[in-house]
Amino acid sequence: MSAMKTRDVEMEPETEIHRKTDCRAPSPGEAAGPESPTSAVPLLSLSLSADYSNKPGVLRNLNLEMQPGEILGLVGESGSGKSTLALSILRLLDLKGGKMSGSILLKGRELTTLPESEMRSIRGRDIGLILQSPMSSLNPALKIGTQMYETWRAHQPGSRKQCTPRFLEILHSLNLDADEKFLNRKPAQLSVGQAQRVLIAMAVLHRPSLLLADECTSSLDLITQKEVLNIFRQLSRDMGTGILFISHDLLAVSALCHRIAILRSGELVEVGLTREILNRPSQPYTQQLVNALPVPESSQQ
Amino acid sequence: MSAARWAAVALLAAVFLIALAANLFAPAPYAKQFRQDLNHPPTQQYPLGTDELGRDRLSRLLYGMRISLLLAPAAALLSTLLAAIVGGAGAYIGGVWDRLTNVVINLFLSLPWLFLLLTVRALLPLDVPALTSVVITFALLGTLGWAASARIVAATVRDLRNSEFVLQARASGCPSLRLLLRHVLPNVKPILIAQFWISVPLFILTEANLGMLGLGVTEPLPSWGNLLRELENYGALAHRPWLWAPLISLVLVMSLFQFILSGEEYAS
């Protein structure tokens, strides 16, 4: 990442230029490149608005599509509605006093009209969420093993003993200590990086088809951040998980995502393939963001 | 915990054990009358003398302590449970329920607690068997003394309901009841335990107040409250100082509770 330049960014995921401001994911017929997954039925198709009682228009007619296995970066400043979008997709916005309207199609299935019991069975099983602060997102009173078991029991039967091999397997795949001792730790006994990986482990326990990662690398140091980004890349590649990577860090987003959507004041300003957004931003706000990316001293010379 | 507080805990535990095993330590049954020794001063046979009916004062004090020290925790348990159910459930469900329970809690807190107890106790039959009076007294303490604890529990649950880890659990599909029992409750448990221990001395003292006014545990059963009634006889206190024993033991137990609990508060 340190070698990254402002105007000539070497990116892995995409090859061809995709039409900017077109919120659709690349369709099978379009040349989207080998790393940009395509499918006949989009993984996620959104058309929604959201309001809070004291702040109307937090999201305004936001239209967005994602393909299975795609990593879509959602970038915007604080208060632009990024986290509101994540909670809206899970239909949990009412917990924060918000109200959402519109349509959310997950693999062609409308979520907004589902009864709460069905929606609950989708949360965690089909859509995983990783929140910003790992230390406050883990229950301080419960051991890691218990929290993983609770996540498991939300959708699957089985005793703690039966589930333990699966927990250890996931912990191992995330470079965590895969042993009982680790499962018996409380969150306070973990580093921030370990806690974030535990959250990822819990979010992917049921192999969801969509993962909402809400600012989940913002509190991490650079080395841990890189490790987490690699994990996301691996999840997308190996498990075909679509990832909505929400962040205000354009640098991290550009290192990971196939496409980037720029959100400002509740509206999508620009959507496109990562390289296109970084090299030829068409909107003034996107240009501002791209120009704000740090450039190493040597590159400037 | 400091050595002084450990010593206080040990002393309080000893008082509890002695009171619980009153039948082993008491020189005589609490109701047995030694009619030849009415109002007897302390002797080897009667370490604290006898009362006007010839009953051994030490035995009555030990049995009285047993009743207070057993039933105050029972009443504290009842009030803590009510606090958890009313305050916790209202705050967890939120919305109208939260507002409604808040109103009820505020209403209970706005009433003078001792006055409320006296009124309700006076409304209930006073001429009841001794054992029934015990049940009535401590059931009243438990059912009327939950409001302060409920307010604290409600505030805690409200914070937890809005916490990130509860949001994370909801996002993982955890059902609402399981969320309450497995995620919220473990975090409320320390608050409930603290409220329980704070209520125990409060209820011991309140029973003593009721007993002194003749509204608590009735004779022949002894309790700290009805033993303190003898202090009404000011004239006798000067030349019969052993009558102070129930008050001194009550002050000692209250001081130990206060010392231990305040230390915990500062430590936390």
Image: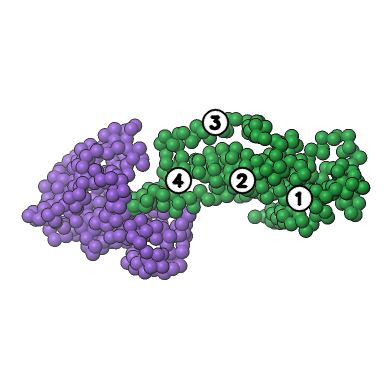
Left of B227 or right of it: where is A13? left
Which element is circle 2 on? Answer: helix
* CA–CA distance in space, label 4 to label 1: 43 Å
- The answer to whether residue A51 shows anywhere in this view is yes
Q: Nearer the viewer, residue B103 or B225?
A: B225
User: Is disc 4 in the same subunit as disc 2?
Assistant: yes
Tag 3 subunit = B
Visual hue assigned to chain A: purple
Is label 4 on the same chain as label 1?
A: yes
Look at the image and give the colour of chain B: green
Q: Amino acid at mark 2?
A: Ala
Marks counted in the figure total 4
The disc label shown at residue B76, or none? 2
Q: Position of residue B206 (x, y in %)?
A: 68, 39
Q: Residue B160: which numbered mark, if any?
A: 4
- The residue that label 3 is drawn on is B107
Q: Within 10 angstroms of label 1, few (less than 14), some, or many (20 or more) residues?
A: many
User: Which residue sits at x=45%, y=37%?
Assistant: B98
Amino acid marked by disc 4: Leu
Looking at the image, can residue A300 be seen? no
Crowd around label 3: few <14 · some 14–19 · many ≥20 (10 Å): few
- Spatial separation of the CA atoms under disc 2 and disc 3: 20 Å
